[in-house]
Amino acid sequence: MVFQRSTAKRRTVAFFGATISVITLAALSYTRIHNQTHLGNLCDHLAARSTPLEAESESTNDVPFTKVISHAAGFTVLENAYWKNDTWYFVSEQPWSFPDLASVVTQGPWHGSTPYTDARVVRLITLDEATAMGIQDHSELKGSTLFFNDRISVPPVYHVVGEMFLGAWRAWQSATWFTSKPNPDIARLAFAHVDDDTFTDHAGMNHYYLERFFPAAELEFVESWEARAKTGKYYRLPKVVIADRKSGHRGPKTRGKPMDDAFALPVHGDWVAPLRQAIVGGYTGAPMPDKGLPVITYLSRQSTHMRKMTQASHENLEAELKKLEQDGIAEFNTVEFSDKDPKDYQAAVLARTTILVGVHGNGLTHLMWMVPNKLSAVYELQQKGSRVDDYSILSEAMNMKHWIVNVDTMCERRDCGPRGLDPSVQIGSNEYTVDAAYLAQAIRTRLAA
Ligand SMILES: *[C@@H]1O[C@H](CO)[C@@H](O)[C@H](O)[C@H]1NC(C)=O
């Protein structure tokens, strides 16, 4: 269902020929059900649904200045940014109020290409220059936009939601910190350089999350932006977050992740709460017991065909963690999600988790549903010589502790040494092990604190 809805939604904003074929298709399926009686109404309805293009076409003679509201490398919140045929135009008499444009946006390179930022990508221009270029004759893309510039690394869900979306969301949340004003709703999520198929992961997580977060927003893909490019018009985005992976990697604080700098932007309180609420808030599935104890969740990968524990280590880990439950210190559950499990159920399980234990992998993106408190922590199982910190940065950005557990030692991100893998490590191995007694003792100590 989710897919069908999103596809229909997307096509209402895909222009020209595509709109006609969708009208035809929708009309056909509609008449099958309603036996043609309401076809006239349907056409009116579809005409109304295709208003985004018309709403854009409102011309104005004004050139509101571009302003930077919040910025970290790769994630920039702007007012009145202009866009034409894949080039951004920032209009200002105060060039010093802009960051280095290379840390705002790049050409969005393909794999293996060197990122660059030149006048084809973005230009900072004066009002006189803008007027000489005819920018006063522009269309407004009404509402607020999250604009994702990447061509690569979509999916899986960690790269879309965990990295680029959460970076954009952090920057967006920081805007309210800087302006002291509430943010308007997001009107559109623009994945301007990828198509829907590329964006869609096998479990449909990217669609599910983003559509739940912003039920009223349009999800737009490359066809929509190519159609805009072909008009040769200027578009004004009254509020936009430009998210650019390669610019993010240029940040002064980066330790290897594109959103490292964005996650240092100031925000009010639990900045992930609105997203968690959107997924878990309306949860009506199987009831979740509350035993009034901290909840330890071991997120198993034993049914997958790669990157899992030896069976002995898996069973030993369960046995050791079970002892914490027997001692009345915590509730303990092993969970293993499959694509068939309702996604809000998966999030709800994590939302009641205090301590998360799991082997390195995309499933750990779920940690974003945990409700941080002073005991919250993530213990990520890796091999000796492995220091992969994708989930450390997410945990820490949510104010939770995170340890990389290398069998019988553990470290926090800043103490683990440079991100990466020793040559001996095979990340896809099915021979992960852990000193379960050592890990259980560490959790016991934490819960006693
Ligand atoms: C958009 O830019 C491309 C590449 O520079 C160019 O070939 C094309 O003609 C431009 N389209 C319009 C409508 O200006």
Image (tube, rainbow, N blue to C red):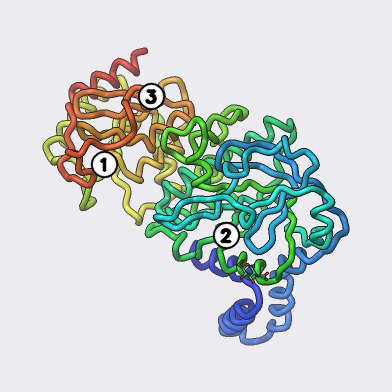
Identify the residue position indicated by label 1 in the image.
300
Label 3, secondary structure: give it.
helix
Residue 1 is at least partly visible in this image = no
1 or 3: tag closer to the N-terminus: 1
Residues at discs 1 and 3 in contact (Cβ within 8 Å): no
Mark 2 to mark 3 CA distance (whole Å): 35 Å
Question: 309 or 424: which is nearer to us?
Answer: 424
Mark 1 to mark 3 CA distance (whole Å): 26 Å
Identity of the residue drawn at 48% across and 41% down = 249
Q: Residues within 10 Å of mark 2 (few under 14, many from 20)?
A: many
Left or right: 131 with respect to 101? right
Residue 373 is at least partly visible in this image = yes
Image x and y of residue 238, in percent: 75, 50
Identify the residue position indicated by label 3 in the image.
414
Question: 159 or 445: which is nearer to us?
Answer: 159
Q: What residue type is labelled 3?
A: Arg
Mark 2 to mark 1 CA distance (whole Å): 36 Å
Label 1, secondary structure: give it.
loop
Identity of the residue drawn at 66% across and 36% down = 70
Label 2, secondary structure: give it.
loop
Q: Residue 120 carries which label?
A: none
Say whether mark 3 is within 8 Å of ligand 1: no
